[in-house]
């Protein structure tokens, strides 16, 4: 007969996350950020900002298909937007810092929530799990997110700072893109990273509605369709460019 | 019919557990899954072995005691079914079935398949109540409630607190449980006075014990009462609103 090693105590449960300190109240924004529900809300808000950027970036770059003059003119206009109330490139820099802020909030929240979730289940299931609802996209958000973040760093090095290895001249956007995408390994990197972005958007584009609490029987079915449509448009637009250049359709 | 059960055996909270395999024959297909364990335990006791400890009480799907991870799914493969109402006819003759306890930091294993779910009580204590006048019972229908609201509150109130949502969640989050316990009160007029306090306190208590929601949707599939993750969205909205709400105006609508 197996011996019972110890009698069950009346209460075993212990909080795994520290309680907020009593007494001194922290500034509202700090207290707000302390909650996981609020972090997810912030991830949704910053996610929408980043989706807006990704979409505008994709649409703008489709000027690649209208020729060198059109794309370079668009790139020049980006530096001029907001003039004359803002100095040249003024609004562009404001937008860049807003985006950078959104990226930081999105990634830091994700990292902190991941740690919280790991602590919430320190012992994994010993037998295989049979997932019924979680999708490939929802289960790989952390990986697709990291892939996209690393890609963005390379993308900036390649086409903004000109240190990606290809011949690069400031302002010659069209030629810089051709020079970069003509290298087929780089074209594959761009394509794979954008597929990862698509998978990330497939879950994120739906999940944000839940995190924001936008739930209404009248449009709930559209939330998934929105995510699929948005991810598809962004992926098709973005993947087409390296694909067309590497296959020699655009040169 | 005959089944091969692989069951998690763990003599105590801090002891090391391991899977043990038992062949159980002469199983009636009309047995519930808990009755299968009754039969197994009878035979184990007959052989002088320690029976498998598992939680059970009403055996009619309303108490929320039974808690088994069956073949990698909380409460087994049937949708909208607690372990006690899962019948052996849902399994093939000769099936291999693996049974594990819920696993979450907030649900420590007491013994074998029994886990301590008191963390749920901490959440409910922090706001799962209303202030009501004592004294004689008020007239029925004194407070009018639209049918759609009553139905929705009832859907949330079906939660039996079994913990399948936490067990199913890849993040070990209790958002479905907490959302159900908050929203069945927040939807109704009787729940309005404490509405913003309730959602703030219950969410913050939940976050001390559990993980966070990443909207996989595993919880609503595992829920024996099929409670929808729509309630999680409603809870999120109420929580964010509560943080920005000017509390002195709390009795105003919207």
Image: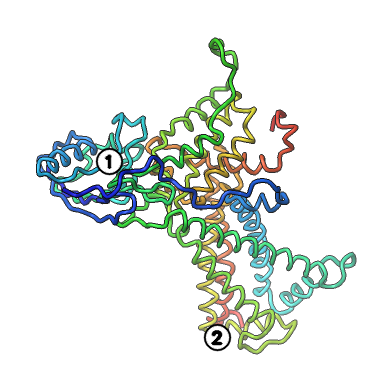
A149 to B123, vertically: above or below: below
Task: Name the residue that disc number 1 marks.
Answer: B54
Q: What element carries label 1?
A: loop
Circles 2, 1 touching at the beta carbon (< 8 Å)? no
> Which subunit holds the residue at mark 2?
A
Marks 2 and 1 share the same chain: no
Q: Quadrant of the N terminus of chain B?
A: top left
**Residue B33 x, y percent position in the rendering:** 23, 39
Q: Give the residue number, with chain letter if any, for mark 2.
A: A183
Alpha carbons under labels 2 and 1: distance apart: 62 Å
Q: Position of residue A175 (x, y in %)?
A: 67, 84
**Subunit ID for the residue under disc 1:** B
Residue furthest right in the image? A84
Q: Eyeballing the image, is A77 above or below B118? A: below
Task: Out of A6 and A155, give the one closest to the viewer.
Answer: A6
Q: Which colour scheme is used?
A: rainbow
Q: Where is residue B92 in the image (x, y as percent from the top left)?
A: 18, 45
Q: Which quarter of the figure has residue A52? A: bottom right
The answer to whether residue B30 is left or right of residue A159 is left
| Above/below status of A51 relative to A88 | above
The spot of residue A124 in percent (x, y) is 37, 57
Secondary structure under tag 2 reads loop
- Which quarter of the figure has residue B187? top right
Residue A191 vs residue A68: left or right? left
Q: Horizontal placement of B187 versus B166: left or right?
A: right
Q: Which residue is drawn at 84% across and 65% down?
A: A82
Which of B118/B158 is in front? B118
Q: Is residue B107 left or right of residue B4?
A: right
In which quadrant will I find the C terminus of chain B?
A: top right
Q: Residue at x 42, y 57 (%)?
A: A122
Q: Which of B58 and A200 is in front in this view?
A: B58
């Amino acid at each position: 007969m197996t011996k019972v090693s110890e009698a069950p105590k009346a209460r075993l449960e212990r909080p795994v996350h520290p309680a907020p300190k009593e007494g001194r109240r922290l500034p509202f924004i700090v207290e707000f950020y302390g909650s996981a529900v609020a972090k997810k809300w912030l991830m949704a808000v910053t996610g929408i900002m980043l989706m807006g950027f990704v979409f505008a970036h994709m649409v703008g770059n489709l000027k690649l298909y209208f020729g060198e003059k059109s794309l370079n003119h668009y790139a020049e206009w980006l530096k001029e937007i907001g003039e004359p109330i803002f100095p040249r490139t003024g609004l562009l820099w404001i937008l860049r810092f807003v985006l950078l802020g959104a990226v930081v909030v999105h990634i830091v929240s994700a990292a902190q929530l991941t740690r919280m979730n790991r602590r919430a289940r320190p012992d994994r299931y010993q037998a295989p799990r049979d997932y019924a609802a979680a999708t490939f996209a929802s289960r790989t958000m952390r990986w697709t997110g990291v892939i996209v973040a690393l890609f963005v760093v390379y993308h900036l090095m390649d086409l903004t700072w000109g240190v990606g290895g290809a011949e690069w001249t400031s302002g010659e956007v069209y030629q810089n893109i051709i020079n970069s995408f003509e290298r087929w390994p780089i074209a594959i990197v761009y394509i794979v990273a954008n597929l990862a972005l698509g998978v990330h958007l497939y879950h994120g584009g739906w999940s944000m509605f839940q995190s924001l609490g936008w739930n209404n029987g009248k449009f709930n079915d559209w939330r998934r369709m929105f995510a699929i449509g948005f991810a598809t448009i962004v992926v098709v637009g973005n993947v087409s460019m390296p694909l067309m250049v590497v296959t020699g359709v655009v040169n | 019919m005959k089944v091969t059960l692989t069951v998690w055996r763990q003599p105590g909270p801090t002891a090391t557990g391991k899977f043990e395999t038992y062949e159980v024959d002469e199983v009636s297909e009309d047995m519930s899954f808990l009755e299968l364990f009754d039969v197994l335990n009878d035979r184990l006791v007959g052989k002088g072995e320690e029976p498998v400890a598992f939680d059970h009480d009403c055996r009619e799907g309303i108490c929320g005691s039974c808690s088994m991870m069956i073949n990698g799914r909380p409460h087994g493969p049937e949708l909208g079914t607690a372990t006690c109402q899962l019948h052996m006819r849902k399994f093939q003759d000769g099936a291999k079935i693996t049974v594990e306890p819920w696993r979450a930091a907030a649900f420590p294993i007491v013994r074998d398949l029994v886990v301590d779910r008191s963390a749920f009580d901490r959440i409910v204590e922090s706001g799962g109540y209303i202030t009501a006048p004592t004294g004689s019972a008020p007239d029925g229908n004194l407070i009018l409630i639209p049918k759609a609201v009553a139905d929705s509150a009832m859907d949330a109130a079906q939660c039996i607190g079994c913990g399948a949502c936490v067990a199913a969640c890849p993040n070990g989050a209790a958002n479905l449980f907490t959302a159900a316990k908050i929203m069945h009160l927040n939807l109704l007029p009787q729940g309005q006075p404490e509405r913003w306090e309730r959602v703030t306190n219950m969410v913050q208590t939940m976050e001390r014990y559990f993980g966070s929601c990443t909207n996989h949707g595993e919880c609503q599939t595992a829920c024996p009462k099929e409670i929808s993750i729509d309630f999680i969205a409603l809870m999120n909205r109420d929580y964010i609103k509560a943080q920005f709400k000017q509390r002195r105006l709390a009795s105003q609508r919207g």
